[in-house]
């Protein structure tokens, strides 16, 4: 694994939170953040080994996320791609599989950034009962943290281990549990651990830009409809006044 400065990456994650007007405690709503940052984001079913990709051209930002993966992993992928788009100095197009060991330094940095960005140290410690900080974190508290910060069980365990809030033995023990079954037992929503119902979801101004180009006669009606069809929006013919008024 590449040698990186973990403290530096942690500070970059905190700085980026500040730039986004987010404090050092609260959870992040990924969809709202993508809207705020004006990142055109498309969720599509992709091969299992491919988590996502991003591209940056001038002041335009694009992200593609695998909608076949569980929601928590999608959130981690989004945070990972944000590092490439807004923090990394020398950008190139990345096809990413966050969490998988790699020799690429920037990919490793993006993983560390995502963990720090989604799971801020101050926020984690604030939510753990004082007694458990001394005696050990319980399973209900783990599920509470995962639910609040919208992260996977594995991502949380890795973060807690890095923060020395879990021992190796505790991490290994918690890694073997039946997450969905036990989360239900403790009354927590399990949607984080399941495939998201967001296939063909688009976040951003893709449809707005497509319509503007059509209304400015920069693209044909057929091309306009094709662009919308590509993101799952299906319109009838657009060449009459009734359709224009009803859109």
Image (cartoon, rainbow, N blue to C red):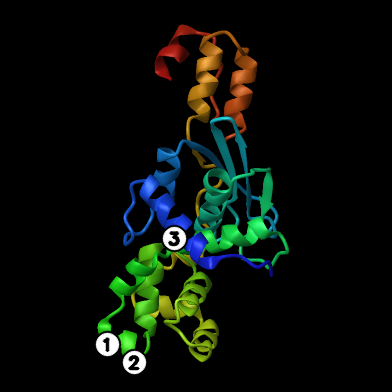
Question: Secondary structure under badge 1?
Answer: helix
Look at the numbered discs 3 and 1 and tell me whether their residues touch, using CB distance below 8 Å.
Answer: no
Instruction: Specify which label sits upstream in the sequence, 3 or 2.
Output: 3
Compared with 136, 123 (above or below) is above
Quadrant showing the C terminus:
top left
Instruction: Specify which label sits upstream in the sequence, 3 or 1.
Output: 3
Compared with 50, 63 (above or below) is above
Residue under pointer 1: 131
Indicate the quadrant where residue 210 lies: top right
Q: Inspect this view and state whether residue 188 appears.
A: no
Label placed on residue 118: 3
| Spatial separation of the CA atoms under disc 3 and disc 2 | 25 Å
Residue at 50 percent across and 52 percent down: it is 197
Question: Secondary structure under badge 3?
Answer: helix
Look at the numbered discs 2 and 1 and tell me whether their residues touch, using CB distance below 8 Å.
Answer: yes
Label placed on residue 135: 2
Residue at 41 percent across and 52 percent down: it is 15
Near-viewer residue (142 or 126): 126
Residue at 41 percent across and 57 percent down: it is 14
Indicate the quadrant where residue 28 lies: bottom left
| Spatial separation of the CA atoms under disc 3 and disc 1 | 24 Å
| In-image side of 148 versus 224 (left or right) | left
The image shows residue 181 at horizontal and vertical percentages of 46, 79
Label placed on residue 229: none
| Spatial separation of the CA atoms under disc 2 and disc 1 | 6 Å
| In-image side of 110 versus 131 (left or right) | right
Question: Secondary structure under badge 2?
Answer: helix
Near-viewer residue (218 or 122): 122
Mark 3 neighbour density, 10 Å: few (under 14) some (14–19) many (20 or more): many
């Amino acid at each position: 694994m590449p040698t990186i400065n973990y403290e530096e990456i942690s500070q970059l994650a905190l700085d980026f939170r500040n730039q986004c007007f987010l404090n050092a405690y609260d959870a992040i709503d990924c969809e709202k953040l993508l809207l705020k940052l004006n990142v055109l984001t498309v969720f599509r079913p992709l091969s299992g080994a491919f988590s996502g990709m991003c591209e940056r051209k001038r002041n335009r930002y694009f992200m593609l996320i695998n909608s076949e993966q569980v929601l928590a992993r999608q959130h981690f992928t989004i945070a990972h791609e944000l590092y490439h788009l807004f923090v990394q100095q020398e950008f190139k197009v990345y096809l990413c599989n966050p969490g998988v060991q790699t020799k690429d330094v920037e990919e490793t940095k993006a993983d560390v950034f995502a963990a720090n960005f989604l799971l801020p140290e101050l926020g984690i410690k604030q939510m753990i009962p004082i007694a458990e900080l001394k005696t050990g974190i319980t399973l209900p508290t783990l599920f509470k943290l995962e639910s609040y910060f919208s992260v996977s069980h594995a991502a949380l365990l890795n973060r807690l281990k890095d923060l020395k809030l879990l021992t190796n033995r505790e991490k290994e023990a918690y890694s073997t549990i039946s997450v969905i079954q036990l989360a239900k037992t403790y009354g927590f929503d399990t949607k984080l651990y399941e495939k998201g119902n967001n296939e063909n979801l688009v976040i951003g101004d893709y449809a707005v830009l497509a319509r503007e180009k059509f209304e400015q006669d920069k693209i044909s009606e057929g091309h306009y409809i094709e662009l919308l069809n590509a993101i799952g929006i299906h319109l009838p013919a657009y060449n009459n006044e009734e359709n224009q008024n009803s859109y």
